[in-house]
Image (cartoon, rainbow, N blue to C red):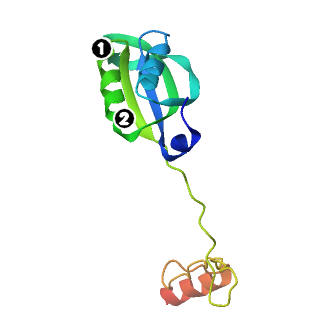
Amino acid sequence: MEDFSTIETQKIYDISFIQRSENVGVVRQIIEKYGGVILNEHPLVKLRLSYPIKKETQGFLGTIECTLPAESVRTVSSDVKLEHDILRFIVNVQNKIKEAAPRSSEEGGLQQRKKRTTVPPKPKGGFNTILSNEALQEKLEEILQ
């Protein structure tokens, strides 16, 4: 068993994979072989592939969340690549999101966003203006004279 202080300093990785069979022990053994500690393991899900991968039309999708020493990530990746049962895999590093402190203005209070008010565009002169019936009648009489 590893010391918790070394686990906290290691990065957390998500290893997602598609494999032929429902045996999840293959990837788990490779991770533990190189000193990885499995933190969370999602159950396998059977899925139909959009296109054949290595002549397979269906597979089992799984994800394992683990910690690994930085020097063994490449060896784990190469061992998983050589495994016959694994069709595809990807290793992602989990990024921890830090909360940012709220920004403050010179007065010390929080800046508040001003609400934008939309003003409808003013109609331009010419044919786009709306006339009442009386005004329209006067315009027609003026034009016909």
- Residue 99 found in image quarter: bottom right
Q: Which mark is residue 73?
A: 2
Q: Residue at x 48, y 83 (%)?
A: 126
- The residue singled out by tag 1 in the image is 54
- Whether residue 114 is situated above or below residue 39 in the rendered picture: below
- Whether residue 134 is situated above or below residue 7 in the rendered picture: below
Residue 112 % position (x, y): 67, 79
Contact (Cβ within 8 Å) of mark 2 with mark 1: no
Tell which circle, 2 or 1, labels the residue nearer the N-terminal end: 1
- Residue 122 found in image quarter: bottom right
Along the viewing direction, whichever of 97 and 72 lies nearer the viewer: 72
Along the viewing direction, whichever of 104 and 29 lies nearer the viewer: 29
SS under mark 1: loop
Determine the CA span between mark 2 and mark 1: 25 Å
Residue 44 % position (x, y): 54, 18
Q: Residue at x 60, y 77 (%)?
A: 120
